[in-house]
Image (cartoon, rainbow, N blue to C red):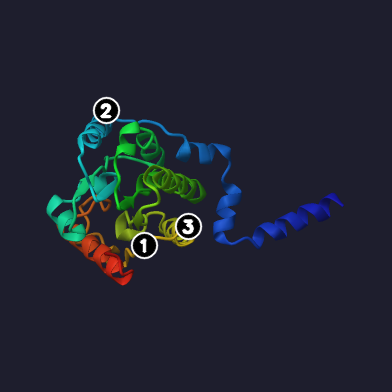
């Protein structure tokens, strides 16, 4: 009987989809790391987070809020303005992971904002730290939940985890799987668009859209990103 149960369990595990298998492998510790709010773990990032908090506290308005890590923080202001065409607050903090964004969104000053649109690009640092897909997904889900509680369910513009590493190959199957699950999450939420990263994929080690570290974007990469955002917003009929 015991052997039959073990065989049955093994068969059931084999029938799981890749996403379900990831979920089965995600324990309490995996989820906790990506979801318990913690401050940045470098002094540079902490200073940036503190400066962002001051910016939020002093902001008079802001139709669009950008949240994310260094990929968001380093987005050139001119390209941001061209992309969104509105008053924008760039609240990106380099090295942020999902748990760091959750920590920042605890700050009462964020509740004073009333953005109509929130742009979110987070997760690549979790991927780099080898966090599991199910943990990253839960971290992002909680960020979206917090955004909705703070700002009454604004329009979301979300970029999935971008390609990274040599030939865009770093944990690429995990990255693609996460992005698929993220799209499902956003579809269920509604009032959200997800931006396709196909144009940013790079088949070799010398890519005009990525810096030499194959993580951060070049000005050309940000131009491609901005164009992809505008295309999705136009397709969605967003004002």
SS for callout 1: strand
Alpha carbon distance from label 3 to label 1: 11 Å
Query: Could you say which is closer to the camera, residue 101 or residue 85?
Result: 85
- Residue 117: image quadrant is bottom left
Q: Is residue 78 above or below residue 193?
A: above
| Tags 1 and 2 touching, CB below 8 Å | no
- Identify the residue under disc 3: 185
Q: Is residue 126 above or below residue 155?
A: above
SS for callout 2: helix
**Which of the numbered marks, if any, corresponds to residue 43?**
2
Percent x, y of residue 111: 34, 38
- Residue 39: image quadrant is top left
Instruction: Mark yes or no: residue 70 visible.
Output: yes
Q: Which of marks 1 and 2 is in front?
A: 1
**Which of the numbered marks, if any, corresponds to residue 217?**
none
Question: Looking at the image, which residue is at 30% across and 30% down?
Answer: 42
Q: How crowded is mark 2: few (under 14 residues within 10 Å), some or many (20 or more)?
A: few
SS for callout 3: helix
Left or right: residue 3 versus residue 50 is right
- Identify the residue under disc 1: 193
Q: How crowded is mark 3: few (under 14 residues within 10 Å), some or many (20 or more)?
A: some
Instruction: Mark yes or no: residue 221 visible.
Output: no
The earlier-in-sequence mark between 3 and 2 is 2
Furthest-right residue in this view: 1
Percent x, y of residue 173: 45, 60
The earlier-in-sequence mark between 3 and 1 is 3
Alpha carbon distance from label 1 to label 2: 34 Å
């Amino acid at each position: 009987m015991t052997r039959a149960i073990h065989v049955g369990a093994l068969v059931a595990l084999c029938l799981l989809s890749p996403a379900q298998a990831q979920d089965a492998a995600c324990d309490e510790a995996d989820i906790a790391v990506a979801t318990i709010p913690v401050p940045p773990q470098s002094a540079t990032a902490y200073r940036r987070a503190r400066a962002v908090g001051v910016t939020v506290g002093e902001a008079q308005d802001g139709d669009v809020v950008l949240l994310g890590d260094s990929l968001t923080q380093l987005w050139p202001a001119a390209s941001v303005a061209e992309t969104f065409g509105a008053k924008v607050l760039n609240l990106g903090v380099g090295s942020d992971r999902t748990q760091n964004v959750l920590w920042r969104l605890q700050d009462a000053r964020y509740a004073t904002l009333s953005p109509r649109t929130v742009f979110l690009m987070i997760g690549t640092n979790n991927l780099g730290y080898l966090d599991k897909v199910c943990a990253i997904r839960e971290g992002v889900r909680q960020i979206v939940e917090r955004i909705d509680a703070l700002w009454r369910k604004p329009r979301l513009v979300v970029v999935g985890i971008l390609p990274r590493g040599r030939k865009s190959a770093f944990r690429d199957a995990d990255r693609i799987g996460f992005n698929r699950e993220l799209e499902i999450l956003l579809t269920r939420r509604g009032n959200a668009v997800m931006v396709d990263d196909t144009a940013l994929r790079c088949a070799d080690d010398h890519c005009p859209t990525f810096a030499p570290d194959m993580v951060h974007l070049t000005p050309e990469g940000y131009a491609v990103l901005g164009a992809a955002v505008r295309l999705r917003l136009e397709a969605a009929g967003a004002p």
